[in-house]
Image (cartoon, helix red, strand yellow):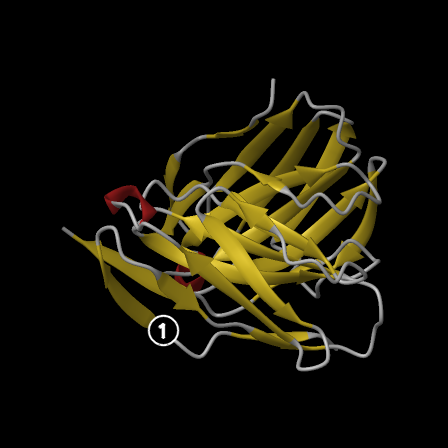
Amino acid sequence: DTEVTQTPKHLVMGMTNKKSLKCEQHMGHRAMYWYKQKAKKPPELMFVYSYEKLSINESVPSRFSPECPNSSLLNLHLHALQPEDSALYLCASSQSGDSGGYTFGSGTRLTVV
Amino acid sequence: AQTVTQSQPEMSVQEAETVTLSCTYDTSESNYYLFWYKQPPSRQMILVIRQEAYKQQNATENRFSVNFQKAAKSFSLKISDSQLGDTAMYFCAFMSLLNKLIFGTGTLLAVQP
């Protein structure tokens, strides 16, 4: 298995809703990442997990809450989002310390109404 | 802080011709990694080619090759024999030893039949 799987592919949520994005990989990668990508812009790093521990938080608002329950799974919990949070959320994984680059999922398209 | 610059927001090439996408970066580190990623309309980020900064030899992957000029901090991507399936957004990316991937602003490449 050489894929990163993200669910759901599309999500529409209200500003008072609570939802979660899920990311899964079975490549034995020990580093996992969340990126946010606005239309026609590059991905921006949000969080990095290394060996299931949060190692980088790029000053992301607390309405985004990451969780890494095990080495294969990464969640992003969403609460009280704003319309400007609408974006493509990409998950990626890599072998920790490996320079081979990241493997990306196909993303969750989030719309906040 | 590292920065990655792509000065060509959009480019167009005829099928079967060759095109070069430009990328420059800024870093004070001596050892790092550079990548080109492709993002087609399907949204998934796909690794095209990678280059290790300590290697002088330019990387090649089939129709894709790079021109890496370390002193000039330049990392251009050449696509030979362009195909319709090459139509995508192309991102140049920099990875430091902290394993943090930083993207340039992207070049939208259109391959014309």
- State the SS at label 1: loop
Question: Between B60 and A27, which is closer to the camera in this rendering?
Answer: B60
- For the residue pair B37 and A5, the one nearer the viewer reads as B37
Horizontal and vertical percent position of residue B112: 17, 55
Residue A22, relative to residue A77: is it above or below? above
- x, y (%) of residue A102? 65, 43
Q: Is residue B11 left or right of residue A7?
A: left
Identity of the residue drawn at 67% across and 38% down: A93
Residue A78 position by quadrant: top right
The outermost residue toward the top is: A1
For the N terminus of chain B, which image quadrant?
bottom right
Relative to B63, say whether B56 is above or below. Answer: below
Query: In this rendering, would B50 be left or right of A57?
Result: left
Looking at the image, the residue that sits furthest to the left is B113
Q: Which residue is mark 1?
A: B9
Identify the residue shown where x is 54% and y is 62%.
Answer: B92
- Residue located 39% across and 38% down the image: A11
Q: Is residue B30 above or below residue B81?
A: below
Q: Position of residue B79 (x, y in %)?
A: 40, 55
Q: Chain of mark 1?
A: B
Residue A113 visible in rendering: no
Identified at 35% across, 63% down, the residue is B19
Residue A83 showing in the rendered view: yes
Q: Amino acid at mark 1?
A: Pro
Coordinates of residue B13 in the picture (x, y in percent): 25, 62
